[in-house]
Image (tube, grey):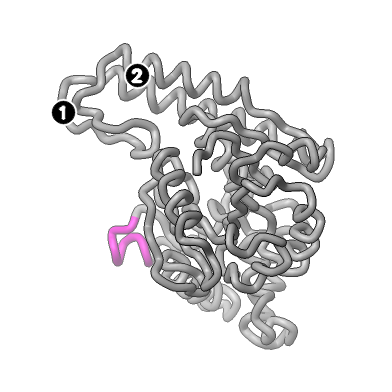
Amino acid sequence: MDIKNVVVIGGGVLGSQIAYQSAYKGFDVTIWLRSDASIERSKPKLERLKGIYNAELASVKERLDGTAIPHSRGLLDNVEKATAADIDALIANANKAFEDLVLTTDLAEAVKDADIVIEALAEDPAQKTEFYTKLAPLMPKKTILVTNSSTLLPSHFAEVTGRPAKYMSLHFANNIWKSNTAEVMGHAGTDKAVYDAVAKFAGDIGMVPLLLKKEQPGYILNSMLVPFLNSAEMLLAKDVADPETIDKTWKLGTGAPLGPFQILDIVGLTTAYNIVVLNPEAQNPESIPGKIAALLKEKIDAGKTGINAGEGFYKYN
């Protein structure tokens, strides 16, 4: 199964990153968005990524001396053997990726020759079901469909995709050029050849494929991360301490570079909210999940959705 034409559904935090990284690694990439307004909102994200890639590669070039220079693993392999010419070629790739990305609202046109479609929509089961129903008759027979869902299982949607054997999960961590992991998770009906092709694709775009043997809500990463973030949100919801103090406690106590609320700003508060409201207890405003949902909703309604919006729990330049 040769994958060349990549379509990313959604241009949010991770959708834009997946698209840009795939284009940087030489794939032909189209991003499908719901509206022209969504296209305009996605452009600054892609411009920001181009700036990050260029700045980091230029920094690596300045320090080339045959040693293990700290760098983002998704940007280059074997930095010890890299030459200035190699880095210049990668900078050219980063710029070409930005120029070559196609953004469109025409779903049929976007997927007509897709080898793989990567769905990166909001963590909303109803929205995903509605979209898959619309998408199913438009994809060619060859197309593999994967979801970047953070917590939802592929078996929940397999039948509605119209191609259960060619459907599975491929979950990326945030800042994928730096935290370059991709969790590869099929369902009971996923074709083994499809699973292997998706794992290979993950490696081809600079990720480290993490192979799951069975379905697990939250995969590996979020099975550990979500309870951690929920604990921090619980402390805030109970007014035990403010976000800055909670983050400081975690960083000083563990040596971690980021606290939970800094991580939430990177993940995006909309994603965090969509995960919390999956808990039936969130319907009760007096419950801890209900209080967490309310504080997240207040920030989302004010446009403070995280680092890409310039403000979440913290303000960003």
255 in magenta = yes
Q: Is residue 161 above or below residue 10?
A: below
Q: Which residue is mark 1?
A: 67
Q: Is any part of residue 86 visible from this angle?
A: yes
Residue at 66% in and 87% down: 287
Res. 234 image quadrant: bottom right
List the residue tagged with mark 2. Answer: 87
Q: Can residue 313 be seen at all in this image of the molecule?
A: no
Predominant SS along the magenta part? helix
Which residue does the image show at 34% across and 31% down from the upper left? 76
Residue closest to the eye, 42 or 257 = 42
Q: Secondary structure at mark 1?
A: loop
| Nearer the camera: disc 2 or disc 1 | 2
Q: Please tell me whether residue 35 is drawn above or below residue 242 in the rendered image.
A: above
In the image: residue 216, left or right of residue 203: right
- Sequence-wise, the earlier of marks 2 and 1 is 1
Q: Amino acid at mark 1?
A: Thr
Magenta extent: 250-256
